[in-house]
Image (tube, grey):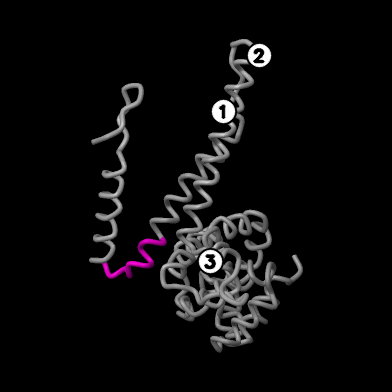
């Protein structure tokens, strides 16, 4: 059964649960652990609600032509509904990433989960390819590097990491273009091990963390025993004069 409104038909609660269960089963057949699958679905649900809230908050609640008392009540009611929509989006996000909020137990950041690493990979790869090309010299440690990057963030921060990466790439577009031209695939120093990370899509993720949380990144980097020279080389390339 579906819910009707003004001639439109929307899925009812039973149909939504059926779609969710179907998706969970399909993901399970593909080898995705149930906890990861549930988190991914939860993030989609929270994101849809948050985007609806953002759109409605952008001036869609306009005054009508009724008398002032009527309009005042209508606008107050619309704002109450909008506020509740934001609260529902918040509760949905908390269910997806956990109630720990900005940090884990005893102030610790939990280790990155498989699905979080995969989401970061999906986010960073097209950004990298917008500045350079696939390199045969990619050190192939994507999971380890992204796990270190995500280790600097709380689950809630990881949920919005794709947007953060996109903003970082847009804000520093010219600088990233110069860096990859001078040190990345196709440059004159492609064989220099110090700059190996420039041949990996993870370089943009690492740079964003070097700018936002350098101490935490170096702690995580050491914990997973990644080469310190990679961080130093990336820093040198990033700070090279224009």
Whether 230 is drawn above or below 55: the answer is: below
> Do the numbered discs 1 and 3 sit on residues whose CB atoms are within 8 Å?
no
- Quadrant in which the N terminus is drawn: top left
Disc on the earlier residue, 1 or 2: 2
Q: Residues within 10 Å of mark 2 (few under 14, many from 20)?
A: few
Q: Badge 3 is on which residue? A: 155
Q: Badge 1 is on which residue? A: 77
Does residue 47 show up magenta in the picture?
no
Disc on the earlier residue, 1 or 3: 1
Query: Front-most of 87 and 48?
Result: 87
Q: CA distance from mark 2 to mark 3?
A: 46 Å
- The magenta-colored residue range is 30-39
Disc on the earlier residue, 2 or 3: 2
Q: Residue at x 64, y 20 (%)?
A: 72
Expressed as whole percent of the image width and height from the top left, the position of residue 33 reads 33, 70
Q: What is the count of numbered marks?
A: 3
Expressed as whole percent of the image width and height from the top left, the position of residue 64 reads 59, 16
Whether 32 is drawn above or below 88: the answer is: below
| Element under disc 3 | helix
Q: Residues within 10 Å of mark 1 (few under 14, many from 20)?
A: few
Q: Badge 2 is on which residue? A: 68
Q: Residue at x 69, y 68 (%)?
A: 211
Q: CA distance from mark 1 to mark 3?
A: 34 Å
> Do the numbered discs 2 and 3 sit on residues whose CB atoms are within 8 Å?
no
């Amino acid at each position: 059964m579906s819910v009707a409104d003004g001639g439109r038909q929307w899925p009812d609660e039973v149909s939504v649960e059926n779609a969710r269960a179907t998706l969970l089963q399909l993901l399970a057949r593909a080898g995705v652990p149930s906890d990861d699958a549930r988190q991914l679905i939860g993030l989609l649900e929270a994101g849809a609600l948050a985007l609806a809230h953002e759109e409605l908050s952008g001036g869609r609640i306009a005054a009508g032509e009724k008398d002032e008392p009527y309009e005042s009540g209508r606008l107050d009611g619309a704002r109450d509904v909008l506020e509740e929509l934001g609260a529902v989006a918040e509760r949905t996000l908390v269910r997806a990433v956990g109630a720990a909020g900005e940090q884990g137990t005893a102030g610790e950041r939990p280790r990155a989960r498989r699905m979080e690493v995969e989401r970061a990979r999906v986010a960073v790869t097209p950004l990298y390819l917008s500045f350079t090309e696939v390199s045969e010299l990619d050190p192939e440690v994507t999971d380890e590097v992204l796990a270190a990057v995500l280790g600097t963030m709380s689950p809630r921060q990881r949920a919005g990491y794709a947007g953060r990466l996109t903003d970082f790439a847009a804000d520093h577009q010219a600088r990233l273009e110069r860096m990859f031209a001078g040190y990345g695939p196709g440059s004159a120093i492609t064989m220099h091990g110090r700059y190996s990370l420039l041949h990996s899509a993870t370089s943009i993720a690492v740079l964003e963390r070097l700018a936002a949380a350098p101490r935490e990144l170096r702690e995580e980097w050491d914990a997973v025993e990644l080469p310190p020279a990679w961080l130093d080389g990336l820093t040198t390339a990033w700070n090279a004069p224009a």
